[in-house]
Image (spheres, rainbow, N blue to C red):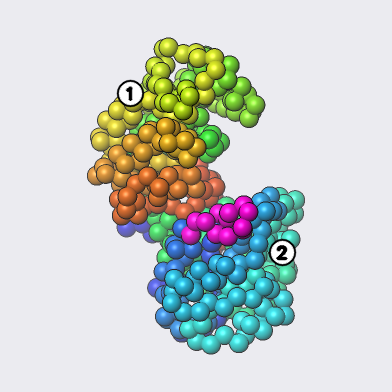
Amino acid sequence: MIDLKINTLDDFNFYDKTVILRVDINSPLDPKTKKIVDENRINKSIPTIKELLEKGAKLAIIAHQGDSLDYFNLIPLEEHAKKLSEKLGIEIKYIDDVAGPAAQEAVKNLNIGEGIILGNLRYLSEEISTFEEAVKLTPKEMLNTFLIRHLAPLGDIYVNEAFAAAHRNAPSMVAFEEILPTAGGRLLISEIKALTTVMEKPKKPSIFILGGLKVSDAFGMMKQVLENGTADKILTCGVTGIIMHMSQGKSFGKKQEKFIYDRSLNKFFEPAKEFMEKWGDKFINPIDFAYGNNDERVEVNLEDLPIEDALFLDIGTKTIELFKKEINNAKTIFVNGPAGAYDQNKIFEKGTYEIWNAVANSSAYSVVGGGDSVSAANKLVKDAEKKFSYICTAGGAMVRFLSGKELPLIKALKKAYKKR
């Protein structure tokens, strides 16, 4: 049993209490229509919302969509409210005001078992990434922000269900805990427990499969999980696998190497070289790769490289079989980052399809995390939610957690637990 030292929904009576619920329903949008195209995070928020309403809470939901760094996704939350209403079978009201007079009045007028979504949190400067980076406030200093001054006095209990934003040091994430009784939602608690199981109590052997284009995510985790013995093996694929080989002096050809240098990914050569020198026996890197030739898949062995005009967008069959052997022997598996460009062309789908399904059908405790990885799981694995032990909604927060960094939200929730 994992004791997180965080209050849960079981620790409070919510009947006739005004509950401020912070969720993360930030969703991918169609760039043209601005309509939601992936409802995964909305679906994941349903159990806690439903439970609180059924327990008689007067529910004020706060959430964000987009950011100053993601301006084109910064839209009102009206569609989110409609989606929640449809899925819950009861109306979740919406008001396009975050914490002003209209929002305050709407919260005050909530009846038992009613819910409302307030306006997009990122409408407030104190909630955007650029503010967080430029004005470094402590949670206590955040008590003077607009959101907390105007909303906290209306609440009886604060519940956080936004693990995907746990790395954010923002008022909506860490300041309510300073003055309100606080609990973690069902999703948040399950996410932390799943990642804690992988990090602190993995059944052995434990393997990490790290790929995708977000190389920084893979390198953010590698050192921590190797130093503390969490990972017995790291299987690299995607661009990460290519970088591991290039750090050892392997040439892939002009086109592939231009891709790496144009994106400044060569900065990972040095840490990759250090990791291979220190933990080389822990890494299993690809032994063959696939590229496209007139829309046909061509596989080539590592020793037959370089090929000057090729981009290697998937692992090859030999690597897939090598990885499957490790997967079949593992007791704990963590996956972050697709094996190839499965979403660009069907000819590059094989690696991700084969590896994801091998993990899904294994008897190991398996966790998939990160936006691209979750999308790949949902697309390529039938009944993915049932087959993987856990699918994590978080990206940046998950990477930081597995990198051994303390997350602002978890620190705030633990502080609130101590005040209980």
Amino acid at the residue labelled 1: Lys
Pointer 2: what residue?
124
In front of the other: 230 or 346: 346
Q: Does residue 387 appear in this view? A: yes
Instruction: Please state the horizontal and vertical placement of residue 124, each as a whole percent of the image.
Output: 72, 64
Query: Could you say whether the residue bearing mark 2 is in a helix, strand or loop?
Result: loop
Q: Does residue 388 appear in this view? A: no
Instruction: Please state the horizontal and vertical placement of residue 174, each as a whole percent of the image.
Output: 60, 62
Residue at 72% x, 80% y: name it. Answer: 101
Ranked by sequence position, the earlier of labels 2 and 1 is 2
Query: Could you say whether the residue bearing mark 1 is in a helix, strand or loop?
Result: helix
Residue at 55% x, 67% y: name it. Answer: 80
For residue 86, side relative to residue 132 (left or right): left
| Identity of the residue furthest to the front in this view | 294
Q: Which residues are magenta?
A: 28-39
Pointer 1: what residue?
318
Give the label on residue 275, or none: none
- Eyeballing the image, is 137 above or below 326? below
